[in-house]
Image: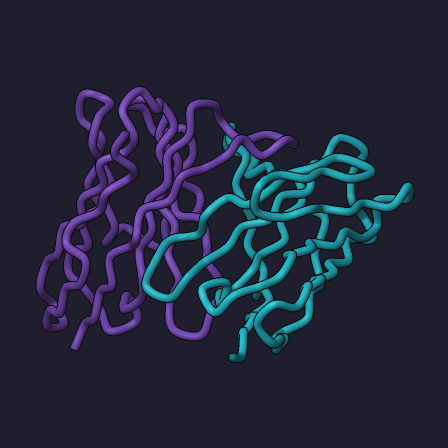
Chain colours: A cyan, B purple
Amino acid sequence: LAKTTQPISMDSYEGQEVNITCSHNNIATNDYITWYQQFPSQGPRFIIQGYKTKVTNEVASLFIPADRKSSTLSLPRVSLSDTAVYYCLVGGQYSGAGSYQLTFGKGTKLSVIP
Amino acid sequence: EAGVTQFPSHSVIEKGQTVTLRCDPISGHDNLYWYRRVMGKEIKFLLHFVKESKQDESGMPNNRFLAERTGGTYSTLKVQPAELEDSGVYFCASSQEGWGRRNTEAFFGQGTRLTVV
């Protein structure tokens, strides 16, 4: 199981670019890296997924170095509404009972300040 | 398209009572998952349905928890009898494909906050 390590919390001013780095030193060859966002009183929401190099969508960018032992979620020009907890997930954990599960860590609590 | 919906949004019950949580997945999603976060802890897997069958219930904490998905549509999670430690937020998620090494995008509901007093 590839364990992930993220900062517990981050603060940023509005309009800044925010980069959240996740370490996953024992990522498996076939594992993908996925980021979820969770607002208070809501369920997690898929943001972006990647395997290597760079992935970009309308919400964020994901940078993955060649060794894949870490990844960085980049949020351009954050606003107050980006205040949330961001989870980095790696692969799926096989439960041994015929199913893979998402394994959530503690996540990074991002606070955007006016 | 409607997302994953959960009912109720919040439930407060006394210890020993029974509570039933409901989840309506996105139409057409065969895979349905229940997760929960108890106070101060991480979000943890409970179980996984593929259509009406329980694919994996290794995360269910004990036999006071019973999940069903009759007809492969909505699912219910019953806690009977509820204990104080069952308090937390229960999330339901659905996806078109099952998760593997590559995480198929999962859609989560807003969660049901359960408070046992």
User: Which x, y percent locates residue A62?
Assistant: 71, 46
**Across the whole image, how many numbered discs are drawn on residues?**
0
- Farthest residue, direction front: A15
User: Is residue A49 positioned above or below A25 on the image?
Assistant: above
Which quadrant of the structure image shows residue A53? top right
Identity of the residue drawn at 41% across and 62% down = A39
Give the residue at the far right of this rendering: A66
**Image location of residue B29, percent across then percent down:** 35, 24
Residue in the picture at 50% in, 55% down: A37
**Residue B60 vs residue A10: left or right?**
left
Quadrant of the drawing holding the C terminus of chain B: bottom left
* Residue A72 shown left or right of residue B1 in the figure: right
Quadrant of the rendered image containing residue A22? bottom right
Query: Residue A110's spot in the image, x, y percent?
Result: 56, 70
Which residue occupies 70% across, 57% down? A4
Q: Is residue B82 above or below residue B7?
A: below
Above or below residue B30? Residue B85 is: below
Q: Residue at x 39, y 47 (%)?
A: B46
Q: Closer to the camera, A22 or B99?
A: A22
Coordinates of residue B89 in the picture (x, y in percent): 31, 62
The quadrant in which the N terminus of chain B is found is top left
